[in-house]
Amino acid sequence: MRIAVVGCNHRTAPVQVREQLAFGDSDAAEALDAFKQHYPHAEAVIVSTCNRTELYFARPLHGTPRSPEAVRWLAEQRRLAPEDISEHFYHHEQSEAVEHLFRVVASLDSMVLGESQILGQAKLALALADRHNAVGAVLGPLFTQAFAVAKEVHTTTPIGAGRLSVGSVALDFAGRLFSRFGDKTVLMIGAGEMGELTLTHLLTKHPRQVWVTNRTFARAQELAKRFNAEAKPFDQLAGLVAAADIVIASTGSSEPLLTVERLRHLPAKRRFRPLLLLDLGIPRNVAPELNELESVYVYNIDDLQRISDERRQQRQTSVAQGERLIEARVVEYFQDRARREAGPIISAFRKRLHSIMQHEIEWALRKLKTADEDDCRIMEQMVHRTIHKVLHAPTKVLSDKSEAGKAQLYVDTLKTLFELPDED
Protein backbone atom coordinates (compact mmCIF):
# COMPACT_ATOMS: atom_id res chain seq x y z
CA MET A 1 0.00 0.00 0.00
CA ARG A 2 1.15 3.51 -0.84
CA ILE A 3 0.73 6.19 1.84
CA ALA A 4 -0.15 9.75 0.82
CA VAL A 5 -1.60 12.99 2.11
CA VAL A 6 -3.18 15.96 0.35
CA GLY A 7 -4.26 19.09 2.15
CA CYS A 8 -3.84 22.75 2.98
CA ASN A 9 -2.91 24.58 6.16
CA HIS A 10 -2.45 28.04 7.63
CA ARG A 11 0.69 28.59 5.56
CA THR A 12 -0.71 27.56 2.18
CA ALA A 13 -4.29 28.82 2.35
CA PRO A 14 -5.91 31.94 3.86
CA VAL A 15 -8.78 31.58 6.30
CA GLN A 16 -11.41 32.25 3.61
CA VAL A 17 -10.22 29.15 1.75
CA ARG A 18 -9.78 26.98 4.85
CA GLU A 19 -13.29 27.72 6.08
CA GLN A 20 -14.72 26.44 2.79
CA LEU A 21 -12.76 23.20 3.17
CA ALA A 22 -13.48 22.59 6.86
CA PHE A 23 -15.24 19.36 7.87
CA GLY A 24 -17.43 19.06 10.93
CA ASP A 25 -17.79 15.60 12.48
CA SER A 26 -20.96 14.79 10.55
CA ASP A 27 -19.45 16.09 7.30
CA ALA A 28 -16.32 14.00 7.84
CA ALA A 29 -18.40 10.90 8.61
CA GLU A 30 -20.37 11.27 5.38
CA ALA A 31 -17.18 11.92 3.43
CA LEU A 32 -15.49 8.80 4.83
CA ASP A 33 -18.48 6.67 3.86
CA ALA A 34 -18.37 8.16 0.36
CA PHE A 35 -14.63 7.55 0.14
CA LYS A 36 -14.99 3.85 0.98
CA GLN A 37 -17.78 3.45 -1.55
CA HIS A 38 -15.70 5.09 -4.25
CA TYR A 39 -12.34 3.57 -3.28
CA PRO A 40 -13.17 0.25 -1.56
CA HIS A 41 -9.54 -0.95 -1.49
CA ALA A 42 -8.12 2.27 0.02
CA GLU A 43 -8.00 3.67 3.57
CA ALA A 44 -8.63 7.25 4.67
CA VAL A 45 -8.46 9.62 7.65
CA ILE A 46 -9.67 13.24 7.47
CA VAL A 47 -7.95 15.70 9.81
CA SER A 48 -9.82 19.01 9.83
CA THR A 49 -9.06 21.82 12.29
CA CYS A 50 -9.17 25.59 12.15
CA ASN A 51 -5.64 25.54 10.74
CA ARG A 52 -5.74 22.64 8.28
CA THR A 53 -7.79 20.20 6.25
CA GLU A 54 -5.90 17.06 5.26
CA LEU A 55 -6.84 13.73 3.74
CA TYR A 56 -4.44 10.93 4.65
CA PHE A 57 -4.96 7.85 2.52
CA ALA A 58 -3.38 4.52 1.67
CA ARG A 59 -3.99 2.85 -1.69
CA PRO A 60 -2.77 -0.26 -3.51
CA LEU A 61 0.41 0.31 -5.52
CA HIS A 62 -1.43 0.55 -8.83
CA GLY A 63 -4.77 1.58 -7.31
CA THR A 64 -6.62 4.80 -6.68
CA PRO A 65 -6.89 7.54 -5.67
CA ARG A 66 -3.73 9.24 -6.85
CA SER A 67 -2.98 12.63 -5.32
CA PRO A 68 -4.61 14.82 -8.05
CA GLU A 69 -7.70 12.65 -7.86
CA ALA A 70 -7.75 12.96 -4.06
CA VAL A 71 -7.65 16.77 -4.33
CA ARG A 72 -10.57 16.66 -6.77
CA TRP A 73 -12.46 14.34 -4.43
CA LEU A 74 -11.95 16.70 -1.47
CA ALA A 75 -13.13 19.64 -3.56
CA GLU A 76 -16.25 17.76 -4.60
CA GLN A 77 -17.02 16.88 -0.98
CA ARG A 78 -17.03 20.59 -0.16
CA ARG A 79 -18.87 21.47 -3.40
CA LEU A 80 -15.93 23.47 -4.71
CA ALA A 81 -14.26 23.66 -8.09
CA PRO A 82 -10.88 21.87 -7.90
CA GLU A 83 -9.18 24.60 -9.93
CA ASP A 84 -10.22 27.17 -7.31
CA ILE A 85 -8.38 25.44 -4.47
CA SER A 86 -5.64 23.27 -5.99
CA GLU A 87 -3.03 26.04 -5.79
CA HIS A 88 -3.37 25.99 -2.00
CA PHE A 89 -2.84 22.23 -1.70
CA TYR A 90 0.30 20.25 -0.97
CA HIS A 91 0.69 16.53 -1.46
CA HIS A 92 3.23 14.07 -0.11
CA GLU A 93 3.72 10.34 -0.61
CA GLN A 94 5.42 7.54 1.28
CA SER A 95 8.24 8.75 3.54
CA GLU A 96 7.35 12.42 2.98
CA ALA A 97 3.71 11.71 3.91
CA VAL A 98 4.73 9.83 7.06
CA GLU A 99 7.16 12.59 8.04
CA HIS A 100 4.44 15.18 7.49
CA LEU A 101 2.01 13.27 9.72
CA PHE A 102 4.61 12.89 12.46
CA ARG A 103 5.39 16.62 12.30
CA VAL A 104 1.70 17.57 12.39
CA VAL A 105 0.84 15.38 15.38
CA ALA A 106 3.99 16.47 17.23
CA SER A 107 2.87 20.11 16.68
CA LEU A 108 6.01 21.00 14.70
CA ASP A 109 3.76 22.03 11.82
CA SER A 110 1.32 23.97 13.99
CA MET A 111 0.66 27.68 13.93
CA VAL A 112 1.69 27.68 17.58
CA LEU A 113 4.68 25.41 18.15
CA GLY A 114 4.39 23.02 21.05
CA GLU A 115 0.61 23.16 21.38
CA SER A 116 -0.99 19.85 22.31
CA GLN A 117 -4.49 20.32 20.90
CA ILE A 118 -3.62 18.82 17.51
CA LEU A 119 -2.74 15.47 19.13
CA GLY A 120 -6.24 15.13 20.52
CA GLN A 121 -7.76 16.25 17.22
CA ALA A 122 -5.76 13.61 15.31
CA LYS A 123 -6.86 10.92 17.76
CA LEU A 124 -10.49 11.90 17.27
CA ALA A 125 -9.99 11.87 13.48
CA LEU A 126 -8.59 8.34 13.63
CA ALA A 127 -11.41 7.17 15.92
CA LEU A 128 -14.01 8.56 13.51
CA ALA A 129 -12.36 6.86 10.54
CA ASP A 130 -12.20 3.62 12.48
CA ARG A 131 -15.91 3.77 13.34
CA HIS A 132 -16.68 4.15 9.64
CA ASN A 133 -14.38 1.27 8.64
CA ALA A 134 -12.14 3.63 6.67
CA VAL A 135 -8.84 2.52 8.23
CA GLY A 136 -7.13 -0.85 8.19
CA ALA A 137 -3.73 -2.43 8.46
CA VAL A 138 -1.83 0.65 7.23
CA LEU A 139 -3.28 3.92 8.53
CA GLY A 140 -4.39 2.58 11.91
CA PRO A 141 -0.88 1.50 13.01
CA LEU A 142 0.65 4.54 11.28
CA PHE A 143 -1.42 7.03 13.28
CA THR A 144 -0.78 5.07 16.47
CA GLN A 145 2.94 5.34 15.76
CA ALA A 146 2.52 9.08 15.12
CA PHE A 147 0.95 9.50 18.57
CA ALA A 148 3.93 7.71 20.14
CA VAL A 149 6.37 9.92 18.23
CA ALA A 150 4.50 13.05 19.35
CA LYS A 151 4.77 11.95 22.97
CA GLU A 152 8.49 11.30 22.53
CA VAL A 153 9.06 14.73 20.96
CA HIS A 154 7.24 16.47 23.80
CA THR A 155 8.98 14.51 26.55
CA THR A 156 12.54 14.51 25.18
CA THR A 157 12.80 18.04 23.74
CA PRO A 158 12.01 21.47 25.25
CA ILE A 159 9.26 22.05 22.64
CA GLY A 160 6.58 21.84 25.32
CA ALA A 161 8.35 24.02 27.87
CA GLY A 162 6.29 27.13 28.52
CA ARG A 163 3.83 25.54 26.13
CA LEU A 164 2.11 27.90 23.75
CA SER A 165 -1.50 27.66 22.66
CA VAL A 166 -3.88 29.63 20.54
CA GLY A 167 -5.33 30.88 23.81
CA SER A 168 -2.03 32.25 25.05
CA VAL A 169 -1.40 34.00 21.74
CA ALA A 170 -4.92 35.46 21.82
CA LEU A 171 -4.17 36.75 25.31
CA ASP A 172 -1.25 38.68 23.83
CA PHE A 173 -3.65 40.51 21.52
CA ALA A 174 -5.84 41.40 24.51
CA GLY A 175 -2.79 42.62 26.41
CA ARG A 176 -1.84 44.92 23.57
CA LEU A 177 -5.28 46.55 23.60
CA PHE A 178 -6.04 46.68 27.34
CA SER A 179 -3.63 47.71 30.07
CA ARG A 180 -5.81 46.13 32.79
CA PHE A 181 -8.56 43.51 32.95
CA GLY A 182 -10.13 43.97 36.37
CA ASP A 183 -12.84 46.25 34.96
CA LYS A 184 -13.48 44.24 31.78
CA THR A 185 -16.32 41.93 30.76
CA VAL A 186 -15.54 38.81 28.72
CA LEU A 187 -18.20 37.16 26.57
CA MET A 188 -17.75 33.66 25.18
CA ILE A 189 -19.99 32.69 22.27
CA GLY A 190 -20.26 28.96 21.63
CA ALA A 191 -18.69 25.90 23.15
CA GLY A 192 -15.71 25.26 20.90
CA GLU A 193 -12.65 23.68 22.46
CA MET A 194 -10.35 26.47 21.28
CA GLY A 195 -12.72 29.05 22.73
CA GLU A 196 -12.62 27.30 26.09
CA LEU A 197 -8.82 27.26 26.02
CA THR A 198 -8.73 30.95 25.22
CA LEU A 199 -11.20 31.75 28.01
CA THR A 200 -9.02 29.78 30.42
CA HIS A 201 -6.07 32.03 29.59
CA LEU A 202 -8.13 35.23 29.89
CA LEU A 203 -9.38 34.17 33.32
CA THR A 204 -5.80 34.34 34.60
CA LYS A 205 -6.14 38.12 34.18
CA HIS A 206 -9.17 38.15 36.55
CA PRO A 207 -11.74 40.07 34.48
CA ARG A 208 -14.64 41.70 36.33
CA GLN A 209 -17.25 39.34 34.91
CA VAL A 210 -17.54 36.51 32.41
CA TRP A 211 -20.61 35.61 30.36
CA VAL A 212 -21.21 32.48 28.31
CA THR A 213 -23.87 32.15 25.63
CA ASN A 214 -24.73 29.29 23.34
CA ARG A 215 -27.63 28.30 21.09
CA THR A 216 -28.29 25.48 23.55
CA PHE A 217 -28.80 27.26 26.85
CA ALA A 218 -28.14 24.11 28.90
CA ARG A 219 -24.70 23.92 27.31
CA ALA A 220 -24.09 27.58 28.18
CA GLN A 221 -25.07 26.85 31.79
CA GLU A 222 -22.72 23.87 31.91
CA LEU A 223 -19.76 25.93 30.68
CA ALA A 224 -20.65 28.88 32.89
CA LYS A 225 -20.63 26.65 35.97
CA ARG A 226 -17.21 25.28 35.01
CA PHE A 227 -15.72 28.77 34.64
CA ASN A 228 -17.61 30.38 37.53
CA ALA A 229 -19.32 32.55 34.94
CA GLU A 230 -22.90 33.56 34.14
CA ALA A 231 -24.94 31.91 31.37
CA LYS A 232 -26.81 34.30 29.08
CA PRO A 233 -29.64 33.66 26.55
CA PHE A 234 -28.42 33.43 22.97
CA ASP A 235 -31.26 35.64 21.68
CA GLN A 236 -29.67 38.54 23.58
CA LEU A 237 -26.43 38.22 21.58
CA ALA A 238 -26.34 41.74 20.12
CA GLY A 239 -26.85 43.35 23.52
CA LEU A 240 -24.28 41.09 25.15
CA VAL A 241 -21.67 42.03 22.55
CA ALA A 242 -22.44 45.72 23.09
CA ALA A 243 -21.89 45.34 26.84
CA ALA A 244 -18.71 43.25 26.65
CA ASP A 245 -15.11 44.33 26.21
CA ILE A 246 -13.62 41.04 24.96
CA VAL A 247 -15.65 38.61 22.86
CA ILE A 248 -14.48 35.08 22.05
CA ALA A 249 -16.45 33.54 19.18
CA SER A 250 -15.92 29.82 18.76
CA THR A 251 -18.94 28.12 17.21
CA GLY A 252 -19.59 25.74 14.36
CA SER A 253 -21.92 28.17 12.60
CA SER A 254 -21.71 28.06 8.81
CA GLU A 255 -22.48 31.80 8.61
CA PRO A 256 -21.05 34.78 10.55
CA LEU A 257 -22.96 35.44 13.77
CA LEU A 258 -21.65 38.98 14.14
CA THR A 259 -22.15 41.17 11.07
CA VAL A 260 -22.00 44.86 10.21
CA GLU A 261 -25.76 44.88 9.56
CA ARG A 262 -26.41 43.56 13.05
CA LEU A 263 -23.85 45.69 14.90
CA ARG A 264 -23.57 48.84 12.80
CA HIS A 265 -24.45 51.12 15.71
CA LEU A 266 -22.25 49.26 18.17
CA PRO A 267 -19.48 51.90 18.58
CA ALA A 268 -21.91 54.65 19.49
CA LYS A 269 -23.75 52.42 21.95
CA ARG A 270 -20.44 51.68 23.63
CA ARG A 271 -19.38 55.34 23.63
CA PHE A 272 -16.50 54.21 21.44
CA ARG A 273 -14.85 52.13 24.12
CA PRO A 274 -12.48 49.52 22.56
CA LEU A 275 -14.04 46.15 21.74
CA LEU A 276 -11.86 43.11 21.03
CA LEU A 277 -13.48 40.39 18.90
CA LEU A 278 -11.47 37.14 18.83
CA ASP A 279 -12.86 35.01 16.02
CA LEU A 280 -11.68 31.44 16.53
CA GLY A 281 -14.30 29.83 14.34
CA ILE A 282 -13.78 28.01 11.06
CA PRO A 283 -15.91 29.01 9.18
CA ARG A 284 -15.53 32.51 10.57
CA ASN A 285 -18.04 33.66 13.19
CA VAL A 286 -17.27 37.37 12.81
CA ALA A 287 -17.63 39.28 9.56
CA PRO A 288 -14.21 40.83 8.81
CA GLU A 289 -15.94 44.11 7.82
CA LEU A 290 -16.60 44.76 11.50
CA ASN A 291 -12.94 45.68 11.78
CA GLU A 292 -13.78 48.84 9.86
CA LEU A 293 -16.04 50.10 12.65
CA GLU A 294 -14.44 52.64 14.95
CA SER A 295 -12.94 51.20 18.17
CA VAL A 296 -13.73 47.62 17.08
CA TYR A 297 -10.75 45.27 16.71
CA VAL A 298 -11.31 41.92 14.97
CA TYR A 299 -8.68 39.20 15.02
CA ASN A 300 -9.21 35.86 13.34
CA ILE A 301 -7.25 32.65 13.45
CA ASP A 302 -4.80 33.83 10.76
CA ASP A 303 -3.92 36.94 12.74
CA LEU A 304 -2.62 34.68 15.50
CA GLN A 305 0.06 33.58 13.05
CA ARG A 306 1.88 36.88 13.40
CA ILE A 307 2.60 36.51 17.11
CA SER A 308 3.30 32.83 16.59
CA ASP A 309 5.99 33.74 14.06
CA GLU A 310 7.58 36.08 16.57
CA ARG A 311 7.79 33.28 19.11
CA ARG A 312 8.90 30.67 16.61
CA GLN A 313 12.44 32.01 16.59
CA GLN A 314 12.67 31.33 20.32
CA ARG A 315 12.03 27.64 19.74
CA GLN A 316 14.25 26.81 16.79
CA THR A 317 16.59 24.67 18.91
CA SER A 318 13.65 22.60 20.13
CA VAL A 319 12.30 22.32 16.60
CA ALA A 320 15.64 21.08 15.28
CA GLN A 321 15.78 18.39 17.96
CA GLY A 322 12.24 17.33 17.17
CA GLU A 323 12.94 17.25 13.44
CA ARG A 324 15.96 14.97 13.90
CA LEU A 325 13.97 12.62 16.10
CA ILE A 326 11.14 12.47 13.55
CA GLU A 327 13.54 11.78 10.68
CA ALA A 328 14.91 8.80 12.58
CA ARG A 329 11.43 7.51 13.44
CA VAL A 330 10.30 7.75 9.80
CA VAL A 331 13.21 5.57 8.71
CA GLU A 332 12.46 3.09 11.50
CA TYR A 333 8.79 2.98 10.52
CA PHE A 334 9.55 2.00 6.93
CA GLN A 335 12.25 -0.46 7.95
CA ASP A 336 9.89 -2.19 10.35
CA ARG A 337 7.05 -2.18 7.83
CA ALA A 338 9.30 -3.51 5.08
CA ARG A 339 10.57 -6.32 7.30
CA ARG A 340 7.01 -7.30 8.17
CA GLU A 341 5.98 -7.28 4.51
CA ALA A 342 9.15 -8.81 3.04
CA GLY A 343 9.17 -11.83 5.36
CA PRO A 344 5.75 -13.19 4.29
CA ILE A 345 6.51 -12.51 0.63
CA ILE A 346 9.79 -14.44 0.76
CA SER A 347 7.93 -17.25 2.51
CA ALA A 348 5.24 -17.24 -0.19
CA PHE A 349 7.91 -17.14 -2.91
CA ARG A 350 9.67 -20.13 -1.34
CA LYS A 351 6.41 -22.10 -1.18
CA ARG A 352 5.66 -21.26 -4.79
CA LEU A 353 9.10 -22.47 -5.92
CA HIS A 354 8.83 -25.64 -3.86
CA SER A 355 5.43 -26.37 -5.37
CA ILE A 356 6.73 -25.88 -8.88
CA MET A 357 9.87 -27.95 -8.30
CA GLN A 358 7.98 -30.74 -6.56
CA HIS A 359 5.64 -30.96 -9.51
CA GLU A 360 8.60 -31.14 -11.87
CA ILE A 361 10.32 -33.86 -9.75
CA GLU A 362 7.20 -35.97 -9.90
CA TRP A 363 7.09 -35.48 -13.64
CA ALA A 364 10.78 -36.46 -13.99
CA LEU A 365 10.41 -39.55 -11.80
CA ARG A 366 7.54 -40.77 -13.92
CA LYS A 367 9.78 -40.45 -16.94
CA LEU A 368 12.79 -42.04 -15.22
CA LYS A 369 11.22 -45.38 -14.39
CA THR A 370 14.56 -46.85 -13.33
CA ALA A 371 15.34 -44.11 -10.76
CA ASP A 372 16.10 -45.57 -7.34
CA GLU A 373 15.85 -44.08 -3.86
CA ASP A 374 19.29 -42.47 -4.07
CA ASP A 375 18.36 -40.80 -7.34
CA CYS A 376 15.21 -39.37 -5.76
CA ARG A 377 17.17 -38.05 -2.78
CA ILE A 378 19.75 -36.43 -5.07
CA MET A 379 17.01 -34.77 -7.12
CA GLU A 380 15.35 -33.38 -3.98
CA GLN A 381 18.69 -32.06 -2.74
CA MET A 382 19.22 -30.43 -6.10
CA VAL A 383 15.81 -28.78 -5.81
CA HIS A 384 16.53 -27.42 -2.33
CA ARG A 385 19.94 -26.14 -3.42
CA THR A 386 18.42 -24.50 -6.49
CA ILE A 387 15.65 -22.83 -4.49
CA HIS A 388 18.17 -21.59 -1.94
CA LYS A 389 20.31 -20.04 -4.67
CA VAL A 390 17.33 -18.54 -6.49
CA LEU A 391 16.08 -16.96 -3.26
CA HIS A 392 19.46 -15.64 -2.16
CA ALA A 393 19.53 -12.56 -4.40
CA PRO A 394 15.93 -11.34 -3.87
CA THR A 395 16.19 -12.01 -0.14
CA LYS A 396 19.35 -9.92 0.10
CA VAL A 397 17.85 -7.13 -2.00
CA LEU A 398 14.70 -7.02 0.14
CA SER A 399 16.78 -7.05 3.30
CA ASP A 400 18.94 -4.17 2.04
CA LYS A 401 15.92 -2.19 0.87
CA SER A 402 14.21 -2.81 4.20
CA GLU A 403 17.15 -1.24 6.00
CA ALA A 404 16.77 1.77 3.70
CA GLY A 405 13.00 1.84 4.11
CA LYS A 406 12.46 1.28 0.36
CA ALA A 407 11.30 -2.32 0.10
CA GLN A 408 7.65 -1.67 -0.76
CA LEU A 409 8.13 -1.38 -4.53
CA TYR A 410 10.18 -4.59 -4.63
CA VAL A 411 7.67 -6.46 -2.48
CA ASP A 412 4.79 -5.39 -4.72
CA THR A 413 6.75 -6.23 -7.87
CA LEU A 414 7.58 -9.72 -6.60
CA LYS A 415 3.94 -10.32 -5.68
CA THR A 416 2.80 -9.17 -9.12
CA LEU A 417 5.39 -11.08 -11.18
CA PHE A 418 4.86 -14.41 -9.40
CA GLU A 419 1.18 -13.92 -8.48
CA LEU A 420 2.00 -14.45 -4.82
CA PRO A 421 -0.76 -14.35 -2.18
CA ASP A 422 -0.52 -12.34 1.03
CA GLU A 423 0.66 -14.50 3.90
CA ASP A 424 -1.02 -14.35 7.34
Image (tube, grey):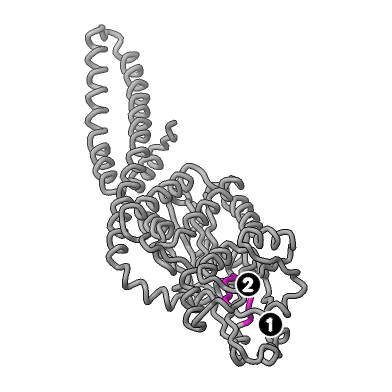
Q: Nearer the viewer, mark 2 or mark 1?
A: 2
Query: Is residue 163 or residue 414 the one in the foreground?
Result: 163
Task: Pick whichever of labels 2 and 1 is earlier in the sequence.
Answer: 2
Which residue is painted at 51% across and 82% down in the image? 178
Disc 1 target residue: 242
Highlighted magenta segment, given as a residue range: 278-287
Which residue is painted at 47% across and 42% down in the image? 137
Helix, strand or loop for disc 2 = strand
Residue 283 lies within the magenta run? yes
Query: Is residue 80 or residue 396 the one in the foreground?
Result: 80
Residue 353 lies within the magenta run? no
Local crowd at mark 1 within 10 Å, few (<14), some, or many (≥20)? some
Real-space Cα separation, disc 2 to disc 1, in angstroms = 14 Å
Query: Is residue 324 or residue 57 the one in the foreground?
Result: 324
Prevailing SS of the magenta stretch: loop
Q: Amino acid at mark 2?
A: Gln
Task: Pinpoint residue 421: horizontal percent, then vertical percent.
Answer: 44, 34
Query: 248 above or below 319?
Result: below
In the rendered structure, the answer to whether residue 222 lies left or right of residue 145 reads right
In the rendered structure, the answer to whether residue 185 lies left or right of residue 304 reads right
Tag count: 2
Query: Is residue 285 or residue 206 the one in the foreground?
Result: 206
The answer to whether one can see residue 222 in this image is yes
Q: Amino acid at mark 1?
A: Ala
In the rendered structure, the answer to whether residue 247 lies left or right of residue 327 reads right
Disc 2 target residue: 209
Local crowd at mark 2 within 10 Å, few (<14), some, or many (≥20)? some
The answer to whether one can see residue 93 in this image is no
Residue 366 found in image quarter: top left
Task: Pinpoint residue 162: horizontal percent, then vertical percent.
Answer: 38, 63
